[in-house]
Amino acid sequence: KAMDKDAAIRSTDSDAAQARLSAVNKGYFPDDIFIQHLVQRARFVPPRPPLINIGTFVRSTAIDALVNAWIHLSPQVQIVSLGAGSDTRYFRLANAGKLPSIAHYVELDFPENTSRKAAAIFRNDVLGRHVLDRTIHQGGMELRSKHYTLLPVDLRGPPSSTLGPLLASGTLQRSIPTLFISECVFVYMPSSASNAIVRWFAESFDIVGGLVYEMFGLTDSFGTVMRSNLMSRNVDLPGVDAYPTLSSQSTRFTHEQFSHATSLTLKTIRQKYISPSELDRIATLEMLDEIEELELVLEHYVISWGVKVAPDSQAECAAF
Ligand code: SAM
């Protein structure tokens, strides 16, 4: 039974990847040439409704902006993507010439998911040319290279054994500013486990950034519908009620030694932070007639980010 539950969690990655592919196919992300190489039977993936495409666009645009802000903070950074699934961010950053600023990029997921991705990177040159010196380990579950590592772990385990080896092996270094990304991942684990991960990052690096994207506030009437849709697909969401409000989302960070944190819903991000020219551009891609429904959905998704810096270096991270 536990196996079935984990299979359901792992399969949420195909949903995320297919949603991205759908948005790419519609022209929302003209720059992502990589996702088609990570989605199985990509040619047969049906388009998602406009509302989903727009949500995917807003989420990804905001996270990209925060990751870019982090990269520009200092000459070298490290990035750790938790539950990375089929995410293409590493390849898009590489394609945009950002690799010189990234000392190491780590992606973690369940072994079944890392095996699929490792195989795709290993055999496909569109992906593989950005991971030049790649080698495969652990029977294909792990892929390593000088600046990119894909590692099979169950993130619900103690961070000292899931993440600790990255420091012990020298893959990551304490002195390099390190950003962790949890894009739609923490809801699938108990908050005791996700809090332990946040704490591990705070304690393991001198300068740390954290970026969490997830659904939240599923207790109002619209949220209840969203919740039962998810439940009907047999996906457990043990972490979904841990931080039910915008302000509590920020305390996820500040309770674990982070200096400050900010949380915004996708609704607010779309209204205030996506440039008018981008909104105009995506408005031409397809018809959306239900703006109210869009906003109801977007206000149940939150991006929160926090920074932990040494007390005397607050200014350094002001831009994040
Ligand atoms: N972050 C990617 C994105 O946004 O496109 C994938 C998101 S997908 C909804 C959730 C991912 O988290 C899946 O790939 C799943 O396998 C992974 N995940 C969830 N719980 C995990 C755990 N305990 N250990 C490792 N990976 C986990």
Image (cartoon, rainbow, N blue to C red):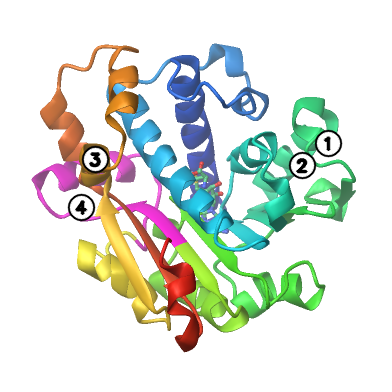
The residue wearing badge 4 is 218
Mark sitting earlier along the chain (4/1): 1
The residue wearing badge 3 is 298
Q: Is residue 40 above or below residue 253?
A: above
Residue in front for this viewpoint, 285 or 190: 285
Residue 105: percent from the left, percent from the top? 69, 55
Q: Residue at x 35, y 82 (%)?
A: 255
Element carrying mark 2: helix
Element carrying mark 1: helix
Give the label, 2 or 3, closer to the camera.
Answer: 3
Classed neighbour count for the residue bearing mark 3: other residues with Cα under 10 Å, few (<14), some (14–19), many (≥20): many
Residue in front for this viewpoint, 227 or 272: 272
Label 2 close to label 1 by CB (< 8 Å): yes
Highlighted magenta segment, given as a residue range: 211-239
Residue 221: percent from the left, percent from the top? 9, 46
Name which quarter of the figure residue 35 lies in.
top right
Q: Is residue 149 magenta?
A: no
Q: Residue at x 54, y 68 (%)?
A: 156
Q: Is residue 283 above or below residue 225?
A: above
Give the label, 4 or 3, closer to the camera.
Answer: 3
Kind of residue indicated by mark 3: Leu
